[in-house]
Structure formats: C-alpha cells, structure tokens
Image (spheres, rainbow, N blue to C red):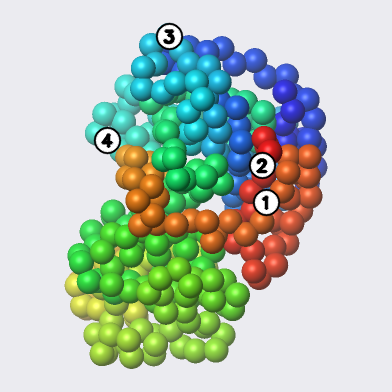
Amino acid sequence: MQAVVLEQVGQLSLRDFPLAETLGPRDVRVAVHTVGICGSDIHYYEHGRIGPFVVTAPLILGHEASGTIVEVGAEVNNLAVGDRVCMEPGLPDPTSRATRLGMYNLDPGVVFWATPPVHGVLRESVVHPADFTFKLPDNVSYGEGAMVEPLAVGMHAANKAQIRPGDVAVVIGAGTIGMVTALAALAGGCSRVIMSDVVGPKLELAASLGPIRPVNVREADLKTVVMAETDGWGADLVFEASGNEQAAAGVFELLCPGGRVVFIGMPNGPLPYDVVAAQLKEARVEHIFRYAHVYPRALALMGSRKIDLTPLITDVFPFARSLEAFEYARHMPPTAVKVQVEVAG
C-alpha cells in the first residue's frame, strides 16, 4: 500500500510499502481517511529519536487518524462495515499490572503507532482492535475525528485537575495541545481560561473559541494579568502545555492558595522546581502521559457540540502532497495550528 515513510533522519518518501496485516476475530480493517501531523512526527523526521525511541529502519509516520471500516472480524458486534471511526493509537498489554489497575497509558509494553519500531497510519488502510476503535457521531467530520487523539490529552489533563464548577484556569502555550486543553477545561466546568503564548494569531484564534483571555507574554506580564483577572487571588488551575523551561518554572506564581498545577508539555531537560513556592500555597501538582479512558467522552462532547475542534484544523493537504505537508508543518506560519493529510479525498 502507499504510505508516508521516514527512510532516515531528514528523508521522507511517499511510496508503496509492503505491510501485510491479518484481520483477527476482534479486529476491524479501516480505510484511512484523515491523519493529523503531530509534533512527534516532526521530531522523528528531524532528529530520528525521542528519548529511548530511535528510528533504526524505515518507519511509517502518523497516529492521529480517522477512517471508514471496510472489514470486521468474526467476533465484532459493536461496529460494522461503513462505520466512520477514529482509532486510539496506543495498545497496552491487557495482562499488565498497569492495565489491570486502569492506567493502561502507563503500561511499559504499550504499542503506540509511529513510535519505533511500530508503524504509524499515514497509509491507505490499517487493521486495529475493535476495542480501541470508536464510531464518530454523524455530525463529526473525518477531520474532527482525527483531532480526538490530541483532544484526549487535554481531557486527560482536565480530569487530573479535578475541575470544580467556576474555576479559573491558566493554560500556558497556544499550540494544538494548549488549545484542546483550554476547550476541555471549559467543557469540564471552568468559567474562563487565561491563555499565554508569544504568537499573536494563535492567541486571536484562542479568543474566538470561548471565554478565553489571551495574553501575549512579549507584550504583557502573565502574573500581573492573572492577578488582575482574579482580584489578586490567583488561578485555581494552571496547565503547563508549552514545554518551555522558563514558563514551566514560574507556574506557582500564577496559582491561588490550594490550587492545582498540571504539567502536560515535555521540556527538553530538567526544570528548576521551587518547592517553597509550592509549599506556601499547598499546591497540588499532577503530571500526565498521553491519556486513558477518554475517547468515548471526547466524542460525546464533540457530538453535542460542547467542543468544536473545526477552527483548529487550519491546513489540509491531499495524500499526494504529504511530503509538502510535512515541510509546511516543520515551518508553520503563525496562523497555523493543526496540519492534516487527507489520505482518501
């Protein structure tokens, strides 16, 4: 089948790739329709590795995907040929301790699309377990379906934050993950979100999505704005979604006494951690890695239009222009948020 293949660092190709996948009794075969380009895809393209995961052989990229079921296994009774679906890309070991405890995202043996040596889904079709394949609501497009994967990260963060109705949240970083985290926080009960970044057009887009107060930290001091917006008390929640070391080091300055911080972004190295600043506010600190048990709730919110991800899909390329799409995603203009490839158009 045709696939987008990372041949080696800095070299992509769109070519026929021999990949035979047998349909098991609890599997479905999906004709892939739309795939989003994630920052991890770009990182593998540019560097060939993320932490211990190293590209040592040609690898198909892509893990944010939607499509149409074209074949079902003999034991599948909740999905049918013709169903429009999205797929959760991480498959844990069902017998592992982490999975049995409900933390399957933390299973050390999880198999995750486009994480070496596991092939991704920027290709014509894929076989996937029915248990990790979810039907799209009729009013949710393929493009939105391919956005469920990043939305799941934001929803997992919102769950970890234990939002209380009326909370005020700060989201640091207006990239895709920051945007979906803000939307998840609002859907979860936050009354408003203060979002910071250095890219004006992204902040303007964020402000159009709901009660989101944009702060360009090149022009204004974030702590000053947060205190002004909360009568000097501070934010109930701070979501660090940028991975920027300097921004992450200042999270406790923005927080109210007894507030909660959730680290989402992944810095390139260790951070200075002000223990005393956290202690003085009895801050509760959470960290997330991917997500677990959120796809059905994400789709329910999208189907009810409580969350609309359409404005975040800023650029769509046909499959034949996949290599161009990757180059565009490497050097995205300030107005771009999510780049997608339509495999079936």
The residue to which callout 2 is attached is 342
Ranked by sequence position, the earlier of labels 1 and 3 is 3
For the N terminus, which image quadrant? top right
Q: Classify 10 Å Cα crowding around label 2: few (below 14), some (14-19), many (20 and above).
A: many
Q: How many marks?
A: 4
Q: Classify 10 Å Cα crowding around label 4: few (below 14), some (14-19), many (20 and above).
A: few
Name the foreground residue: 170 vs 297: 297
**Amino acid type, residue under disc 3 in the picture:** Ala
Name the foreground residue: 246 vs 81: 81
Label 1 and label 4: CA atoms lie apart by 36 Å
> Is residue 51 at all visible to an observer of this figure?
no
**Amino acid type, residue under disc 2 in the picture:** Glu
The x and y percentages for residue 178 are 47, 63
Label 3 and label 2: CA atoms lie apart by 29 Å
* Residue 129: quarter of image: top left
Residue at image location 42% in from the left, 33% down from the top: 135
**Amino acid type, residue under disc 4 in the picture:** Gly
The residue to which callout 3 is attached is 74
The residue to which callout 4 is attached is 102
Ranked by sequence position, the earlier of labels 3 and 4 is 3
The x and y percentages for residue 307 are 40, 57
For the C terminus, which image quadrant? top right
Q: Is residue 263 left or right of residue 147?
A: left
Ranked by sequence position, the earlier of labels 1 and 2 is 1
Q: Secondary structure at mark 2?
A: strand
Ranked by sequence position, the earlier of labels 4 and 2 is 4
Q: Are marks 1 and 3 in contact (CB under 8 Å)?
A: no
The residue to which callout 1 is attached is 316
